[in-house]
Image: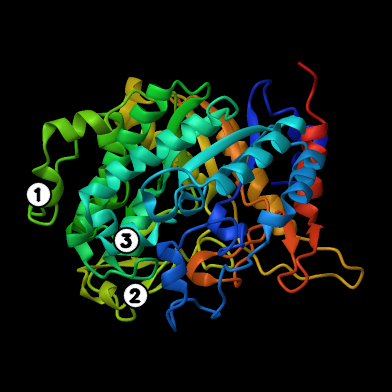
Amino acid sequence: MIEEELEPATFARRIPHGFTIGAATAAFQIEGAVREGGRGESAWDTFMAEPGRILDGSTAAIADDHFHRYREDVALMKDLGLDSYRFSLSWPRIQPGGKGRANREGVAFYDRLLDEFLAAGIRPMATLYHWDTPQELQKAGGWLSRDTAKRLGDYATLAAEAFGDRVDMWVTINEPTTVTLNGYALGIHAPGEELLFDALPAAHHQLLGHGYSVQALRAVGVAGGIGMTNVHSPVVPARDRVTDRYFASVFDTVHNRIFADPVLLGSYPKPPFGSGRLFRALTEVDSEDLATIHQPLDFYGLNYYMPTRIRAGSPKNGETPDGEAERMKDVPFSLVEFPEFAKTGFGWPVAPEYFGVALGEVAERYGEALPPVYITEGGVSYPDARSPKGAFHDARRIDYLAEHMAMALDGAPGVDVRGYFVWSLLDNWEWAAGFSQRFGLVHVDFDTLKRTPKDSYRWLQAVLASRPAP
């Protein structure tokens, strides 16, 4: 964007009254206190303790210590001027073991947190499941087990009973795509399974858990709206060849369609010709399961980070956007780079125009079945450096956010985009990348835990303060 368009008062004029601007985090990445307050063990606790699993050898045992510093963090949100904050409830903190009654200490923590949000004038968006499966359920099969879907519904009931009067919006489950592909197909996230297409039952059971959770929230009668969040990546062939186009269609199906179609349309997509054997676990499901998954939603959460380019032929090094995976070498297609775009710290292409493509695709595919959309995550990692005076001048992040927020504000025909949540409020523990990637508007010193707002925080703060009064 040109400098004039980045000027906060100018950019603020783009934002219509009622459009929500928020920031997002996940419990496991920021809370720490993994052995406090009656919290149980999660699959990620087990995974990160295994040698070689985490890039820098770190753990989330302390992370940002948000469990103890939440008042400081909510004060940062208030000072920033956020309308809403998307956080996740820790399943093993609320229901250790994934069964039975709620843990009083865990519920008390989120009671305090929610009250702090409301006192600050911030509307809470709560995610029920952001990847921290209780370890006891993981031992019993995790998302390969149908029982875990039922357990998520039971946990949703506990959360609804405890917090249903104060949560503005509920997200049942976050990015089942990532859990399935990284966690069960390729083994680079917890629980570390390497099943390739045999991982697809984990996709179905997560979606079933979503359906049970919607039913549970509605049965309790929560005050807030209910939705779910999928990550969408537009998929394009690397070359104008039949094989590249074919495998791009396969990847689009496995990354996007199988997670959105059943939620919004009530059916799994027809597999590309000749690939039915790979998708059999989803094409032979019971119609009652699909009815459970296909619940009416108040909104649809869409996360966007990057497009994907596919070339026929197995990759030599097994690279994926989240790290190398040995099993990727057994897949008959490769994910290739976009040399025309700049890269993030993760090596992801910075391509806001493809964000517009993602919005256009969901409009075309789902039409009137698409409820109002919130961009529940959008953000970028860069290796932010401290200036001699102690500041963090992250101009590239400002550019990224301005370009992507502008795309969300411009929208696409047929998509009612109602908000944008920046990932992330804080630098955090970034899953298998450990502390090596920084997405935050606020810098966190992982030794001292000192919080320092970056220039991107100050830019967004000025934008929000410049919005015209309704």
Q: Which mark is residue 325?
A: 2
Q: Which residue is mark 1?
A: 273
Which residue sits at x=56%, y=63%?
34
Which residue sits at x=55%, y=44%?
104
For marks 2 and 1 on the same chain, the one whose residue lies earlier in the sequence: 1
Q: Position of residue 46 (x, y in %)?
A: 42, 71
The residue closer to the viewer here, 369 or 198, is 198
Q: In this rendering, would 12 be left or right of 217? A: right
C-alpha separation, residue under disc 3 versus residue under disc 2: 21 Å
Q: Which residue is mark 3?
A: 138
Closer to us: mark 2 or mark 1? 2
Vertically, is 224 above or below 59?
A: above
Quadrant of the frame with the C terminus: top right
Which residue sits at x=44%, y=67%?
322
Vertically, is 8 above or below 371?
A: below
The kind of secondary structure element at disc 3 is helix
- Three-letter amino acid code at disc 1? Phe
- Three-letter amino acid code at disc 3? Gln
- Three-letter amino acid code at disc 2? Ala
The kind of secondary structure element at disc 1 is loop
Question: Toward which corner of the image does residue 209 lie, by quadrant?
Answer: top left
The kind of secondary structure element at disc 2 is loop
Label 2–label 1 contact, CB within 8 A: no
C-alpha separation, residue under disc 2 versus residue under disc 1: 27 Å
Question: Toward which corner of the image does residue 192 lie, by quadrant?
Answer: bottom left
Q: In this view of the protein, can residue 7 be seen by the observer? A: no
Q: In this rendering, would 227 be left or right of 420? A: left
For marks 3 and 2 on the same chain, the one whose residue lies earlier in the sequence: 3
